[in-house]
């Protein structure tokens, strides 16, 4: 996700923001992203009811569609500013709602939801602050990508481990919790990086 084209600033590392994004709404990738967002409550309900096999199938379809919309957007020149917003929103909602559902299903402790939710809340505040200065979301940092990937991996493993109850799945559950903790740590580290970049841009604007 990249900054809005209304400013021509680069980020603190000198990386330029994507010039290809267009002000279009009705594109195939955007439609796929909307379908991904619609599927998230379905996944959450299934997980909360311990319907783990069905939830894994929908998560797999969602993951495939996530890759597909990126390919379509690049190949057919359908990269849009809306798409750059919808895609990360879908990722954030999937993580938050899945963790909420796992908490309801008593698969993970509630503190995981609180810690992840607080980070997303702070990022939401930062996005609002940036929007007031004409910026869109900040470029995705590899730390954030890694944290998101670890959290998604942990969620899938936790769901899978809940299908059966035996020593092997108990071990898998513990491994998934460890991955989740590492993912949360990177998730917050990325949050601090985004906050540093975003507040730096705001300070620069205020000096002008």
Image (cartoon, rainbow, N blue to C red):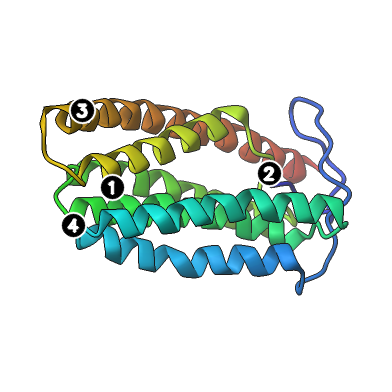
Q: Earlier in the sequence, mark 1 or mark 4?
A: 4
Q: In this view, does 156 lie to the left or right of 201?
A: left
Q: Distance between the residues labelled 1 and 2?
A: 30 Å
| Place of residue 110 in the rendered image (x, y in percent of width and height, measured from the top left) | 19, 47
Q: Which of marks 4 and 2 is nearer the N terminus?
A: 4
Q: How far apart are marks 1 and 4 (CA)?
A: 10 Å
Q: Earlier in the sequence, mark 2 or mark 3?
A: 3
Q: Indicate which label's residue lies in the foreground, 3 or 1.
A: 3
Could you classify mark 3 by the number of other residues whose Cα lies within 10 Å: few (under 14), some (14-19), or many (20 or more)?
A: some
Tags 4 and 2 in contact by the CB under 8 Å rule?
no
Could you classify mark 4 by the number of other residues whose Cα lies within 10 Å: few (under 14), some (14-19), or many (20 or more)?
A: some
Q: Indicate which label's residue lies in the foreground, 2 or 3.
A: 3
| Place of residue 11 in the rendered image (x, y in percent of width and height, measured from the top left) | 76, 34
Q: Which mark is residue 104?
A: 4
Q: Mark 3 points at which residue?
A: 174
Q: Which mark is residue 113?
A: 1
Q: Which mark is residue 202?
A: 2
Q: How far apart are marks 3 and 1 (CA)?
A: 17 Å
Q: Distance between the residues labelled 4 and 3?
A: 18 Å
Residue that appears at 78% across and 55% down: 73
State the SS at label 4. helix
């Amino acid at each position: 996700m990249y900054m809005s084209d209304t400013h021509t600033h680069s980020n603190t590392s000198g990386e330029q923001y994507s010039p290809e994004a267009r002000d279009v709404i009705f594109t195939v990738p955007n439609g796929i992203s909307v379908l991904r967002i619609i599927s998230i409550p379905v996944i959450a309900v299934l997980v909360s009811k311990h319907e783990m096999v069905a939830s894994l199938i929908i998560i797999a379809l969602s993951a495939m569609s996530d890759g597909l919309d990126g390919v379509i957007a690049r190949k057919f020149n359908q990269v849009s500013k809306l798409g750059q917003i919808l895609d990360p929103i879908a990722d954030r909602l999937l993580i938050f709602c899945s963790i909420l559902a796992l908490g309801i299903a008593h698969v993970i402790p509630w503190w995981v939801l609180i810690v992840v939710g607080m980070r997303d809340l702070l990022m939401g505040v930062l996005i609002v602050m940036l929007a007031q200065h004409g910026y869109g979301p900040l470029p995705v940092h590899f730390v954030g990508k890694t944290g998101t990937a670890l959290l998604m991996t942990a969620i899938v493993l936790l769901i899978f481990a809940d299908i059966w109850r035996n020593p092997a799945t108990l071990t898998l559950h513990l491994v998934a919790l460890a991955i989740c903790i590492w993912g949360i740590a990177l998730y917050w580290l990325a949050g601090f990086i985004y906050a540093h970049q975003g507040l730096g841009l705001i300070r620069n604007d205020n000096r002008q």
